[in-house]
Image: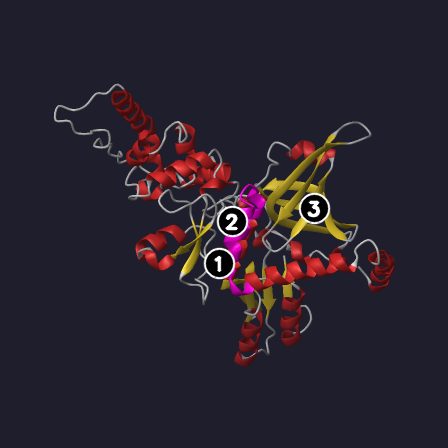
């Protein structure tokens, strides 16, 4: 928004503030803003635990809060039947062994190093954030572990009220990783029916007044050993987590693809600006939002999608013809490469899509022309010039392959460098200030 429009907007807001948002409102909001800012700055672990507990039913807000914890260096521990409560709670990390701590924080959104000043505390995931796990079931689990920790899946089944903690609840707990400390998810899913059957058999015997020959209570003496089976593949595990939590505890499967997309695009989403309006650009990213609509003219199907490349988000308009060609693979969390015309709608940049393709790093070179940068050195360039160029290009780390052309006789010798760069105006300008106009070639 330019200065003139901003001043016009403010001129409209100012008189409205006198009655529409009076001083009492303003003071109240300011006080709440101050209080929450103070809590976040001085009690970060407590504040984030409270935020996530308040938003436990909203997967998007929980995911955002976990991302914020990562930035703040606060450890978020996964759900665990032996430690988790109803909501998100503060946990003493020092009480965990180093092995347990490392196991539990390895995968959750690539946890950042522990925050200085709060390294002794983390936020434990609440069981209420898991789908199909009700408050009554959680209270039964907490009661069961009061005297001693749960040792196995069968131990858990035998100590809880299975009318509240039923098969569906237990299955959800296993798939969400809340029983990972008791064994692999694959093994526990295999013996779950057997565990419940044994517990029900024991409960029936007790209700009928049966006892052992020596009068001992055998209801808790049975044991079911987990079979030695291979753990489920990572894509299945993360699919379970996404379904039951609404987001990923492990690294999302599309992240690896995103890391390799840089060499096949012309611009990062964050680089879409006034300079490229109405020009054709190629961007890549993961589809984070997809909305299908029908055109008013002839009820043809089209779509609006939001693309995220980790550095920016842009809305892409897919008109009926292009949508018909690509609708079979257009879905959330698909990584795609899009070519289209840069546009702007209400001060927001967007893309009018010409073509859209699924991106697969293993086959990308066959389907997408990879961007390559070549730097041509003049014949008079000495070692000092080469050092200056090397220093200049290393300031722009990225994903685009780079080669240098060094004069050799009547031609040039091409050397592929071991690192990759980020191709932007600053990169080209820095290099050409040293070697002269036209020294950088992009193909």
Residue 308: give x, y in percent of width and height: 61, 49
Is 56 a magenta residue?
yes
Instruction: From the image, state whether disc 3 or disc 1 is nearer to you.
Output: 1
Q: Secondary structure at mark 1?
A: helix
Residue 27: give x, y in percent of width and height: 72, 61
Q: Quadrant of the C terminus?
A: bottom right
- Which corner quadrant of the image does residue 24 belong to? bottom right
Q: Which mark is residue 337?
A: none
Instruction: Determine whether 50 is above or below 6 in the image.
Output: above
Residue tagged 1 = 45
Numbered circles on residues, count: 3
Question: CB of mark 2 within 8 Å of CB of mark 3?
Answer: no
Question: CB of mark 3 within 8 Å of CB of mark 1?
Answer: no
Q: CA distance from mark 3 to mark 1?
A: 35 Å
Is 317 a magenta residue?
no
Residue tagged 2 = 255
Do we see residue 260 in this rendering? no
Q: Viewer-proximal residue, 23 or 153? A: 23
Packing grade of label 3 (10 A; few <14, some 14-19, many >=20) is many
Question: CB of mark 2 within 8 Å of CB of mark 1?
Answer: no
Q: CA distance from mark 2 to mark 3?
A: 20 Å
First in residue order: circle 2 vs circle 3? 2
Dominant secondary structure of the magenta stretch?
Answer: helix
User: Which residue is depicted at the point 20% across and 29% down?
Assistant: 218
Q: CA distance from mark 2 to mark 1?
A: 27 Å
* Colour treatment of the image: secondary structure
Single out the residue that lies furthest toward the top.
208
Q: Which mark is residue 315?
A: 3
Q: Which residues are magenta?
A: 41-63
């Amino acid at each position: 928004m330019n200065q003139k429009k901003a001043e016009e907007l403010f001129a409209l807001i100012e008189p409205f503030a006198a009655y529409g948002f009076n001083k009492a409102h303003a003071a109240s909001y300011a006080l709440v803003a101050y209080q929450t800012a103070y809590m976040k700055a001085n009690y970060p672990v407590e504040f984030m635990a409270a935020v996530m507990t308040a938003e436990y039913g909203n997967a998007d807000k929980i995911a955002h809060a976990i991302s914020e914890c990562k930035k703040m260096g606060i450890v978020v521990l996964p759900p665990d039947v032996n430690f988790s409560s109803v909501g998100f709670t503060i946990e003493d990390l020092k009480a965990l062994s180093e092995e347990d701590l490392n196991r539990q924080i390895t995968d959750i959104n690539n946890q950042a190093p522990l925050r200085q000043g709060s390294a002794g505390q983390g936020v434990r995931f609440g069981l209420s954030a898991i789908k199909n796990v009700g408050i009554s079931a959680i209270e039964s689990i907490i009661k069961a572990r009061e005297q001693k920790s749960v040792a196995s899946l069968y131990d858990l089944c035998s100590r809880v009220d299975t009318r509240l903690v039923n098969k569906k609840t237990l299955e959800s707990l296993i798939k969400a990783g809340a029983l990972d400390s008791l064994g692999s998810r694959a093994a526990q899913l295999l013996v779950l029916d057997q565990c419940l059957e044994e517990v029900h058999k024991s409960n029936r015997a007790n209700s009928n007044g049966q006892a052992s020959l020596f009068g001992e209570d055998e209801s808790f003496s049975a044991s079911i050993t987990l079979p030695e089976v291979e753990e489920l593949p990572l894509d299945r595990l993360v699919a379970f987590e996404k379904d039951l939590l609404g987001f990923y505890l492990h690294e999302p499967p599309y992240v690896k693809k995103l890391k390799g997309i840089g060499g096949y695009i012309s611009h990062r989403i964050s680089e879409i600006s006034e300079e490229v309006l109405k020009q054709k650009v190629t961007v890549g990213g993961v589809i984070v939002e997809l909305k299908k609509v029908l055109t008013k003219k002839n009820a043809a199907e089209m779509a609006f999608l939001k693309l995220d490349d980790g550095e920016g988000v842009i809305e892409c308009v897919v008109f009926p013809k292009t949508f018909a060609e690509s609708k079979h693979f257009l879905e959330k969390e698909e990584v795609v490469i899009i070519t289209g015309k840069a546009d702007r709608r209400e001060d927001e940049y967007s893309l009018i899509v010409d073509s859209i393709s699924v991106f697969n790093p293993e086959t990308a070179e066959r389907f997408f022309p990879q961007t390559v940068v070549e730097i041509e050195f003049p014949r008079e360039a000495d070692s000092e010039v080469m050092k200056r160029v090397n220093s200049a290009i290393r300031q722009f780390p990225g994903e685009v392959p780079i080669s240098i052309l060094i004069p050799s006789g009547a031609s040039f010798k091409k050397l592929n460098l071991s690192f990759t760069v980020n191709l932007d105006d600053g990169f080209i300008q820095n290099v050409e200030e040293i070697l002269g106009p036209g020294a950088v070639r992009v193909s």
